[in-house]
Image (spheres, helix red, strand yellow):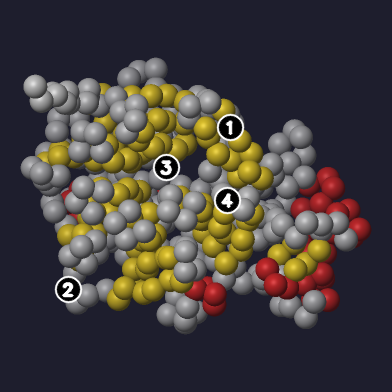
């Protein structure tokens, strides 16, 4: 996981909130892949040459071993801008460098970074769209649109743009990213992105709303996306929930607006709900329990049955489930949904919830 919570936050240790962490479920511990930028010594490291600009790595700062430093790569919450590629063993997220929430200009760090880039004959602005962490090599790699294909065709792809969902699709071993003007497939093995143009007349989510949630259904090869539209890019509260609930059918290469039966929310965005696919029970599970879901009348778990195209009767969220932003994933080995819930830049608890017991598999006599 990565992404700023309280934007521009610096911990008591002096480290900026750009840390990149891995949660080891079976060891029940956090592992820091990048501990966060140590703000008090950053300027000193750049001036001494301990950190230098490497023009072979998009002009990013690298350490003495040539390792690129992901300094302030996201100017917002990580949300669904993060994706893990189990085939390539790489973690990818939208990001840049020295984003505008980074508070160190008062110490000259941002201007010094720009100065070091100019000395290398590079423009001050960093041309970076993605960051990739290679688990096998234990290295971070910045990636520009120009490295992925035709930069003009990928103009919409950028940090925190589009619908804010990038989802690994197992059947294609690629990452799917739906935008407002097109859809995109990212191949981390080949380091290439291809554009899927919007077909005439196909259903789309409300344009420009952003902050959508999403997850992948491996049984049907679907990517569910929706729930966004709260805040500055608001859609009317009387919009039918079915207008904000779509899925992309990977094999058929088409978007579908299923208009499911049953009661389900109009908004299940990144600040309102957790969304994950339960592969044991074969259900989409949407849990309204984040910072915009404080009142009891909206704190429910909504379970979607794709075979019936219907939401089941909502399940109340347990009263002791805390309020706050966080992450979720479904663990099929344990048959539980795992939630990490915390306010910005706080260490939050992990909670486990099971929708139903796994069906018993009877052995043949």
Along the polypeptide, which appears first: circle 3 or circle 4?
A: 4
Query: Which mark identifies residue 271?
Result: 3
**As rendered, which of 81 and 160 lies closer to the eye?**
81
Along the polypeptide, which appears first: circle 3 or circle 2?
A: 2
Q: Which residue is label 2 attached to?
A: 201
**As rendered, which of 29 and 264 lies closer to the eye?**
29
- Extreme residue in the top direction: 320
Q: In front of the other: label 1 or label 3?
A: 1
Q: In front of the other: label 2 or label 1?
A: 1
Q: Is residue 330 above or below residue 364?
A: below
Give how far across and how far down residue 250 sits, in percent. Answer: 24, 61
Q: Label 3, label 4: how many angstroms apart (C-alpha)?
A: 33 Å
Quadrant in the picture for the C terminus = top left
Q: Label 3, label 2: how many angstroms apart (C-alpha)?
A: 30 Å
Is 23 on the left-hand or right-hand side of 335? right
Q: Which residue is label 4 attached to?
A: 136
Residue at figure coordinates x 82%, y 71% from the top left: 115
Is 134 on the left-hand or right-hand side of 171? right
Query: Which mark identifies residue 30?
Result: 1
**As rendered, which of 220 and 107 lies closer to the eye?**
220
Q: Secondary structure at mark 1?
A: strand
Residue at figure coordinates x 65%, y 61% from the top left: 97
Along the polypeptide, which appears first: circle 2 or circle 1?
A: 1
Q: In front of the other: label 4 or label 1?
A: 4
Q: In front of the other: label 3 or label 2?
A: 2
């Amino acid at each position: 996981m990565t992404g700023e919570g309280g934007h521009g936050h610096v911990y008591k240790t002096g480290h900026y909130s750009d840390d990149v962490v891995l949660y080891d479920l079976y060891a029940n511990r956090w592992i820091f892949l990048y501990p966060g930028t140590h703000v008090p010594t950053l300027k000193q490291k750049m001036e001494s040459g301990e950190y230098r600009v490497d023009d072979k790595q998009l002009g990013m700062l690298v350490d003495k071993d040539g390792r690129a430093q992901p300094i302030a790569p996201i100017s917002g919450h990580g949300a669904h801008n993060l994706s893990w590629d189990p085939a390539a063993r790489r973690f990818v997220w939208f990001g840049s460098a020295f984003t505008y929430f980074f508070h160190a200009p008062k110490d000259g760090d941002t201007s010094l970074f720009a100065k070091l880039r100019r000395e290398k004959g590079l423009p001050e602005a960093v041309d970076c769209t993605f960051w990739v962490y290679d688990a096998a090599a234990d290295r971070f790699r910045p990636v520009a649109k120009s490295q992925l294909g035709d930069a003009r065709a990928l103009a919409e792809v950028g940090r925190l743009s589009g619908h804010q969902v990038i989802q690994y699709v197992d059947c294609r071993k690629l990452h799917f990213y739906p935008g407002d003007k097109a859809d995109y497939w990212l191949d981390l093995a080949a380091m290439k992105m291809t554009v899927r143009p919007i077909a005439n007349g196909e259903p789309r989510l409300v344009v420009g709303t952003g902050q959508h949630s999403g997850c992948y259904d491996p049984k049907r090869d679907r990517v569910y996306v929706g729930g966004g539209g709260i805040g500055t890019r608001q859609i009317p509260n009387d919009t039918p929930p079915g207008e904000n609930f779509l899925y992309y059918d990977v094999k058929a290469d088409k978007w579908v607006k299923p208009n499911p039966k049953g009661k389900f929310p109009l908004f299940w965005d990144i600040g309102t709900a957790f969304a994950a696919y339960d592969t044991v029970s074969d259900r989409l599970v949407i849990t309204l329990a984040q910072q915009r879901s404080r009142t009891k009348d909206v704190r429910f778990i909504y379970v979607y049955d794709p075979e019936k195209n219907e939401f089941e009767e909502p399940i109340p969220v347990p009263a002791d489930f805390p309020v706050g932003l966080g992450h979720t994933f479904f663990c099929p080995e344990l048959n539980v949904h795992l939630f990490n819930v915390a306010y910005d830049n706080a260490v939050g608890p992990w909670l486990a919830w099971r929708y139903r017991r796994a069906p018993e598999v009877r052995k043949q006599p």
